[in-house]
């Protein structure tokens, strides 16, 4: 009889936990950042007794840890251990396997949900197409003055100042242009700044149209670069920059996804291997990026496009009430969908009624709006820090554990914070979207 190679029983424990009804959703939720018990119970719609039992078992097996704040009024949250994050990656692999072999499972396979299905039956998740097998590694900001923007970015995130380098980009029909660029490595992501210089490029077009802002999301292709290019072209991606020989290609998917995306091969990915260069040990750059927020006109259609292009699992549509500063409760809502993928998740936001998100949509159309960080018990300290650094707060009020700060004048981006607290007075976007 052959023995299964599992000397410490870890694999069997993992498979046992994965087979539990609530464990996969719980692991996926905690992978986006620590959560308090009440938030977990609300988001999973699970009985407290069942949730407590599931958390206890995951703690015993080393996948989840209990986090206690040092504040006078003790607050308890739950987060993933390094072993738990490994289990989350295992779930990604298992979901990919299930999707690739869905056609072999007969009538028991998962039915693909169309945009019409989602509209007729709200709350249903959108099933993904074949996964792109590409991992988000960076976000690119196009700026008018890279020296000033780089200095501001380093100050806000507590990072060492990076020296801009000069380069050139090429594209279809002989298009070429000179650029200056620099990049900052954060805890689990990177941000690149690009200033267009001589010649003509999509960066110059973007800057002339919108000013400083998010130009593209970078995806490192894990395998099959040529097939991924065909995959994106078949789904309406417009090739604007790069080549196979260069090891990177830009596709304009603004209408479909609200962003241009860059496909880059691993040996040309200059971001993921660069160490995080901190200037302030307690700076914002030490915290994990929780999600990228994308404002869209139609959240069901955008979810369908993301499922078709990137093969991302999407959550059910949820309605939230953002806490915009200077606005009464109930003066605006939004419909959201969160999307799981390798690396950093995305959240699609469709504004309902007036507000800053609607203003952004009217000015930009579908576009990346903000990046949100999970900062835990440092929330209040970092809120004060971002105010001192000149951030204009546009979302979040006293008593809420989330906030957005507008730094578009400095480096073209809105920065969000999420803590682990919560008053129950109003559900924050992170709780409402499962993020």
Image: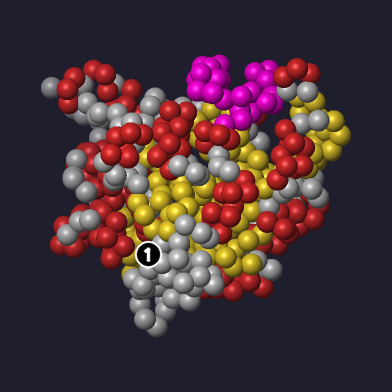
What is the x, y in percent for residue 148? 80, 55
Could you tell me if residue 229 is visible in this image? Answer: yes
Left or right, 50 with respect to 240, comes to left
Residue farthest along the front direction in this orientation: 353
Q: Is residue 232 above or below residue 179?
A: above
Left or right, 260 with respect to 313, comes to right
Residue that appears at 61% across and 28% down: 251
Q: How is the image coloured?
A: secondary structure
Residue that appears at 73% across and 23% down: 171
Residue that appears at 62% across and 46% down: 364
Q: Is residue 401 above or below residue 112?
A: below
Q: Is residue 302 above or below residue 153?
A: above
Secondary structure type for disc 1: loop
Give the magenta range: 225-253
- Nearer-the-camera pick, 229 or 136: 229
Quadrant for the N terminus, please: top left
Give the residue pinned by disc 1. 427
Look at the image and say whether residue 240 sits in the magenta stretch. yes
Which of the 4 quarters of the picture holds residue 10?
A: top left
- Nearer-the-camera pick, 146 or 314: 314
Left or right, 352 with respect to 123, comes to right
- Nearer-the-camera pick, 295 or 193: 295
Could you tell me if residue 429 is visible in this image? Answer: no
What is the x, y in percent for residue 131? 42, 28
Please rate how many residues cluster around mark 1, counting C-alpha atoms within 10 Å: few if below 14, some from 14 to 19, many from 20: some
């Amino acid at each position: 009889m052959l023995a299964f190679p599992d000397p410490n029983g870890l694999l069997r424990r993992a498979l046992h936990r994965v087979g539990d009804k609530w464990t996969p959703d719980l692991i996926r939720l905690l992978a986006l950042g620590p959560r308090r018990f009440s938030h977990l119970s609300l988001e999973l719609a699970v009985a407290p007794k069942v949730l407590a039992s599931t958390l206890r078992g995951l703690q015993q097996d080393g996948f989840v840890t209990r986090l206690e704040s040092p504040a006078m009024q003790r607050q308890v949250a739950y987060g993933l251990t390094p072993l738990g994050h490994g289990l989350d990656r295992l779930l990604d692999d298992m979901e990919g396997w299930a999707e690739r072999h869905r056609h072999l499972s007969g009538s028991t396979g998962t039915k693909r949900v169309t945009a019409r299905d989602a509209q007729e039956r709200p709350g249903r998740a959108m099933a993904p197409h074949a996964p792109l097998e590409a991992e988000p590694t960076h976000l690119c900001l196009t700026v008018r003055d890279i020296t000033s923007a780089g200095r501001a970015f380093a100050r806000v995130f507590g990072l060492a100042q990076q020296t801009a380098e000069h380069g050139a980009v090429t594209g279809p029909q002989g298009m070429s242009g000179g650029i200056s660029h620099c990049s900052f490595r954060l805890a689990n992501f990177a941000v690149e700044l690009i200033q267009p210089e001589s010649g003509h490029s999509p960066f110059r077009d973007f800057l002339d149209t919108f000013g400083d802002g998010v130009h593209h999301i970078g995806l490192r292709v894990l395998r099959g670069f040529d097939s991924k290019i065909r995959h994106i072209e078949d789904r309406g991606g417009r090739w604007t920059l790069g080549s196979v020989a260069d090891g990177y290609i830009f596709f304009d998917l603004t209408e479909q996804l609200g962003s241009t995306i860059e496909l880059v091969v691993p040996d040309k990915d200059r971001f993921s291997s660069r160490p995080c260069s901190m200037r302030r040990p307690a700076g914002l750059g030490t915290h994990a990026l929780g999600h990228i927020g994308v404002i869209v006109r139609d959240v069901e259609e955008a979810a369908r496009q993301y499922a078709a292009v990137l093969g991302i699992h999407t959550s059910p549509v949820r309605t939230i009430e953002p806490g915009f500063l200077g606005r009464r409760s109930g003066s605006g809502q939004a419909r959201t969908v969160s999307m799981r993928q390798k690396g950093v998740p995305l959240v699609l936001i469709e504004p309902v009624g007036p507000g800053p998100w609607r203003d952004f949509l009217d000015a930009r159309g579908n576009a990346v709006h903000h990046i949100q960080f999970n900062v835990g018990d440092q929330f209040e300290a970092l809120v004060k820090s971002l105010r001192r650094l000149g951030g204009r707060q546009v979302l979040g009020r006293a008593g809420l554990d989330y906030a957005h700060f507008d730094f578009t004048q400095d480096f073209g981006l809105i920065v969000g914070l999420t803590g682990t607290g919560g008053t129950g007075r109003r559900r924050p976007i992170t709780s409402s979207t499962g993020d």
